[in-house]
Amino acid sequence: MRKMNEGAINRVAGSKQELLTRVLRDYQLYIMITPVMVWYIVWCYFPMYGLQLAFKDYSIFKGINDSPWVGVKHFVIFFSGPYAWRVIKNTLAINILNIFIIFPLTIFVALMINEVRCKWFKTSVQTIIYLPHFISAVVVAGLVVTFLSPSSGIVNVIIAALGGTKTYFLAVSGYFRTIFLTMRGWQSIGFGTIIYTSAMCAIDSSLYEAAEIDGAGRFSRIWNITLPGIMPTIAVMLIMKIGHMLQLGSESIILLYQPVTYETADVISSYVYRVGLLDGNYSLSTAVGLFNGVVALILVMIANKISKNISEVGIW
Amino acid sequence: MKRKSKGGIIFDVVLTCFMLVLVFVTIYPLWYVLVASFSSAEAVTTGKVIFWVKDFCTDAYAQAFRTKNLITAYENTIFYSVVGTFLSISMTCLGGYVTSKKRLAGRNIFITIIMITMWFSAGTMPTYLNIRNLGLMNTRTGILLLGAVSAFYLILMRTFFEGVPDAMEESAKIDGASDFTIFLKIYLPLSGAAIVTIILYYFVDRWNGYFWSMILLKDESKIPLQVLLKKLVVEMNATYTESSSYDYTTTSRETMIFATIMVSTLPIVAIYPFIQRFFVKGVTVGAVKG
């Protein structure tokens, strides 16, 4: 018994000694990672300390530490107020439309690109349709605003030429989602195809040859070989899209919405931005942000777990 | 060559048409901005410009460049993008390299600290207050440091470094090379392609970002292009206000915005064809490893 203890103590001492030598041996690596760790602590972990504001009544004069605790007051205010349902509904609506329209369209475009035989034509098309991904949110919003301008925007000019009446589309809440999704689609469909076209490259080409010998047409080959071949990728992307639902950023929303379209345009992140940074209600904004962050975290974790299972199955 | 069936030919024709439509829809908005920016304000606002330049003039550009703001904003954007990208890639390489060393004691702690931020962030308001507490409101330093490291790119970089055979490091160690030397002289040169890819990602993110610059920067002399453009766009979207930073006597709001869009997007579009393959590589690598 005593012997065993001594042995354990020796081992501990030994591993401590060993740890010290290892740390000393790699001291340069520790120097190298120091700036990175300092950055992470200052920029990602310091703000987490500020999360307590969600449970406090923040006052600029008292600062974060001395503001009084109020429990879940701000969560109650948010959920009993008129905006909670509105922003949650809008966030979900935009995401669901995204999943039902843009997501399948992306897959469709990828399937079509894969069918193009002429190499240079295919590459040129791909190069062009990836481009909008690299255009900034402000520029894209600028395009939308000018194109839809009620007086001289090209859309209204065409409508007027066809005998219709000019409409200020951005000021009608019923049009907001259509406008936003069109913008999103323009920007993301092309670049979104990359993941699928590269999955298609991995499909065994002998499958296609065999199908051709058996007399399968183009549609049949797409339906029976290409589509099943990229199914695991589709499944993973779908789950990821659902998992990242609540991370819908405010950046492009706040460029396009107006008070008259808040009804359909205001999402959680734009609400957090407006309440906190424009209205100065720091505690409420922090509370809503925290709620969003926690639910988003749970969603992403579930999504990751499911997609891990699927992609393991998908390998087989 | 095999003879094509009738159905096959129809399929190819429809496919080609679809591709052309796709290309048209993608390009047209940008094309329109280009031709409209070179057309007279009158032609643009009355809707005469559709596919081609009408009443060629460069008033919009002259106007845009006359206002000193645009040039200052351009300089700022270049400064933030270049210095910021340098900062980002340095930190990303350091972090990626060190966390790729399996022998390192405490490696998992570092990785955990980095990974958690991919899953959960404190949010807009706490980030804002943190910057204020650090005294970095309305400073260039704040803009450069905020978002300097992306956990995703760091992990991407780590994966590349892990792919370098350990034998390289071991033989250098025998020759007496220090960790600094091994990092700078062996690992960095070997990871050129990966580094270029990530530099491009950071650069485009920096060039295009506007949100935090808009919130943090109050001085006109510090704002980047995107914030300037945002002001123009939102000003137009909001109900017409008489007070504006530009004089619209010879140009219209639209042509002014178009000229500014062209000027701010041109560098990205111009280098785009050359860098496109790097981006594609980045996406597929991320897909495999992520």
Image: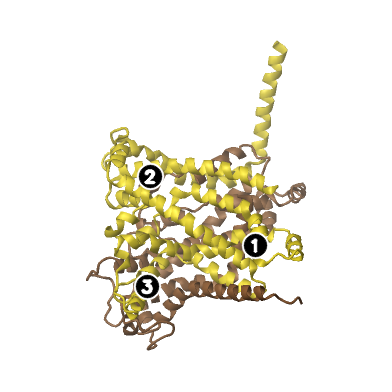
Chain colours: A yellow, B brown
> Measuring 54% from the left and 61% from the top, which residue is drawn there?
A106
Residue B37 percent coordinates (x, y): 40, 80
Badge 3 amino acid: Phe
Residue B193 percent coordinates (x, y): 65, 61
- Secondary structure of residue under mark 1: helix
- Secondary structure of residue under mark 2: helix
- Dot 2 corresponds to which residue? A289
> Measuring 57% from the left and 38% from the top, which residue is drawn there?
B109
Labels 2 and 1 in the same subunit = yes
Chain under label 2?
A
- Dot 1 corresponds to which residue? A222
Q: Residue furthest left?
A: B242
Badge 1 amino acid: Ile
> Measuring 70% from the left and 11% from the top, which residue is drawn there?
A2
Which quadrant of the rendered structure holds the N terminus of chain A?
top right
Badge 2 amino acid: Gly
Chain under label 1?
A
Does the residue at mark 3 contact the one at mark 1 (Cβ under 8 Å)?
no
Q: Which residue lies furthest to the top in this view?
A: A1
Q: Which circle's residue, 2 or 3, is located before the other in the chain? A: 3
Labels 2 and 3 in the same subunit = yes
